[in-house]
Amino acid sequence: MRSLVTCLEYLLIAQDQTTWNHTTTLKALQTLLILSLDSRPKPRKRAQEAVRNIVTRPPLMMMVHPGMKVVVQTTLQILKESGNGVASAAGAKDKDNATQMILHTLQLVRMVGKAWPAEVTIQQQKDRKLTRHNDDMKAVDADLLSMYRFFQ
């Protein structure tokens, strides 16, 4: 199992931006996400590490990994379903299974979540640079306008 996860990890890391638009690539990532919720601890941990490694290495010329959207959607869906499973569980065993799924999902979020703050920070930096650039352009436009009026 470990070898399979490692092969899939390196295969997905090597993909470029256009390949991430294919459904087969996204399904391969979803397969790792499902494995990262497995009840067996060793395969679960290795799959979580693989998902983290994939998401923290976006393709060239990209700030955010295109697979991050799939990771977020899948984890939110699993958390909602598991939360509903805990609320509507008839027996103790069903409630324990749903609780375990929530814990495994939160463990995945904790491991992959290290990629999320960097995205926000990068986006904030881009926004600040854009704002500064716009302010600089307004100042240049004002200077050019005043020079034009001076020479008129």
Image (spheres, helix red, strand yellow):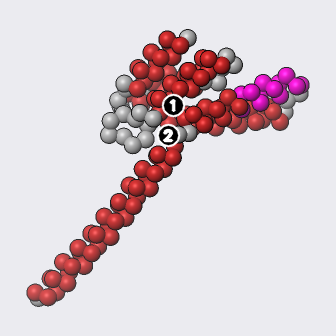
Percent coordinates x, y for residue 86 in the rendering: 81, 33
> Is residue 94 highlighted in magenta?
yes
Percent coordinates x, y for residue 61 in the rendering: 32, 40
Q: Quadrant of residue 42?
A: top right
Percent coordinates x, y for residue 119 in the rendering: 46, 46
Percent coordinates x, y for residue 112 in the rendering: 55, 35
Classify mark 1: helix, strand or loop.
Answer: helix
CA separation in Å, label 1 and label 2: 8 Å
Graded by Cα atoms within 10 Å as few (under 14), some (14 to 19) or many (20 or more), the crowding at tag 1 reads many
127 vs 1, nearest the viewer: 1
Q: Is residue 70 left or right of residue 127?
A: right
Q: Which residue is at 15% across, 82% downward?
A: 148
Q: Which residue is mark 2?
A: 115
Which residues are drawn in magenta? 91-102
Q: Are marks 1 and 2 in contact (CB under 8 Å)?
A: yes
| Residue type, mark 1 in image | Arg
Residue 21 is marked as none
Q: Measured along the vertical axis of the image, is residue 121 above or below residue 74?
A: below
Q: Which residue is mark 1?
A: 52
